[in-house]
Amino acid sequence: MKPHIFILFLLLISASSCGDLNLVPLSDGSGETWNSNSEEIEMSLNGLYKDAFWMKDQDDWTDDWMYRDATTPITSATLNGETDFVKTWWTNTYKAIARANIVIQSISRAQENLSPDLIARYTGEARFIRAAQYSRLISHYGNVVYLDKQVDIEEALQMKQTDKQVILKSIYEDFDFAAAHLKKTYASNELLRATSGAALAMKARIALQMGDWAVARDAAKACIESTAYKLHPSFSDLFLSKTKNSVESIFSLPRSITLKVTQGDCQNYVTRNAGGYAAKVPSWDLFCAYLCKDGLPIDESPLFDPHKPFQNRDPRCAATIVEFQTPFLGFMYQPHPDSVKVRKTSDNTLVDNKDTRSVAQYASYNGLVWKKGVDGDWLLNSWQVEPDKIIIRYADVLLMYAEAKIELGDIDQTVLNAINTVRARAYGVAYTATTSYPAVNITNPAELRKIVRTERRMEFAMEGVRYMDIIRWKLAEKVLNKINYGLLEPDDLRKKIVQKGLWFFPQTPSIDEDGVADFSPMYDAGLIKQIAIRKFDATRQYLWPVPSTEVLTSGLIQNPNY
């Protein structure tokens, strides 16, 4: 069993919640002798698990998202070398790499005090972290400076970028070393740390992002065959604050309200009736990507009714997006413009419905709100919540394995089993119960590719996975050059939609071969409203720019067209 108590661990990472990284290395006080025993090495390694060193891509960089009429530097094509997260990610990642290199270089000081196996385990942990950090750099920035040892400032300023494919080989070597020497699991009385399975999973992820299908397949397969992980019984419960250190979490960071390490910005996700803003919401693009219960997209399934769009959908749809006229956070959720009153579930009274724009101007612009991971805990503790920060989970490994095998043309029953295991969990059944859910049984590569991509979108919405998926699939230029649509203003909504019996969707949008919905016929007919125009510049945005300060001071080569 993995540990559920992380007090010391959280104490060590808690400073990151305030933005103060406290990045002076622990060895500074006695640089010539530090890391000479187990306690000192573990203190150094603990510092590498700071939340600020484990950045995740944001869903608002994708087509799954709407924040009223706002866009981001990525979805407005204004990304440049001065963009805040471009600079912060670069800086914090290299700080983590520098710390990992210090541990790797200095750990020989402990050879007289520790066994070779323990030295190898600690080294493997530092190399795991270094590999994960470099994975982020090459997947986002391309060719970067590669440092595998501690260097002084003058030496660092003279270093040039290394080809990302060369760095990738070093990443694989680090992950392989970590997988060979890290523990498979930890006992309940031990602190949670990176495991051999985490090294394999993260290796599979970067290999998939780099299109190195055989490496991704083999790493994912090894992780699966370790038998250390399985899917959480409930898809919905997995993301709640009460679910700590699930057996599905391969690598995650704990959070704690007490220690002020929390998931911020919660009020923007919560419905207005419950006291939130309902400002950051799922897009219609995401909503229409969920399949129906027959496994077909909404434009092909006879089960889909655009006027009752939640009915007969994959269960992950209603687990991710709040279904209309269902209780949520103490109120019935209903964005219908005529529902000016709504029932409060605690006392069964009717109150003003602030979740419809006919009552509250800034209610959700498209009628949708997030449900995934959101529960009553979000209304407590001044909007601070403490779900685990999941970096990678077992469902991802299963779908990466399936995708890699599909791209290799190596399609067999294990591919179908991997996809079906993930899909069946959403329906609450075993993957072998093929009559209880829409099991995948085809072997056509093109169709399977479409299926696994749709499966990833349904499974990982709101988890920071979609961004790198559309980047590596080269779909960003398509999906991020589309309009974000929403509901008409209340008077027009009543006149053109409600009174004509067309609520919620006046038509069923068509879904293309990439799972992308086409809302333009409804817009051209004046039945929906343009909220924001997304933009993505395919000539440059598949890579981030190198921060401007690095180009100016270090002479690094800027990525094309920035």
Image: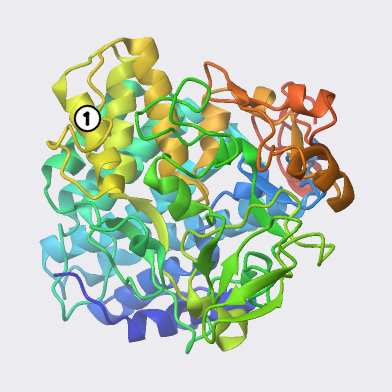
Q: Is 509 placed left or right of 392 in the picture?
A: right
Whether residue 28 is visible, yes or no, is: no
Location of residue 481 in the rendering, given as x and y in whole percent from the top left corner:
74, 27
Where the C terminus falls, by quadrant? top right
Location of residue 545 in the rendering, given as x and y in whole percent from the top left corner:
72, 37
The amino acid type found where label 1 is placed reads Asp
**Residue located at (28% from left, 28% from top):** 402
Q: Nearer the viewer, residue 288 or 401?
A: 288
Location of residue 243 in the rendering, given as x and y in whole percent from the top left corner:
33, 71
Task: Tell me the quarter of the picture where residue 213 sits.
Answer: top left
Q: Is 473 placed left or right of 183 in the picture?
A: right
Q: Nearer the viewer, residue 326 or 89?
A: 326
Q: Nearer the viewer, residue 536 or 424?
A: 424
Location of residue 397 in the rendering, given as x and y in whole percent from the top left corner:
29, 40
Classify 370 as above or below 138.
below
Q: Give the number of callouts.
A: 1
Q: Residues within 10 Å of mark 1 (few under 14, many from 20)?
A: some
Q: Nearer the viewer, residue 318 or 324?
A: 324
Whether residue 118 is visible, yes or no, is: yes
Task: Tell me the quarter of the picture where residue 6 sits.
Answer: bottom left
**Residue located at (41% from left, 52% from top):** 130
Q: How is the image coloured?
A: rainbow
Classify 49 as above or below 224.
below
Read off the residue under disc 1. Answer: 218
Classify 388 as above or below 529.
below
Q: Which element is circle 1 on?
A: helix
**Residue located at (18% from left, 31% from top):** 417
Where the N terminus falls, by quadrant? bottom left
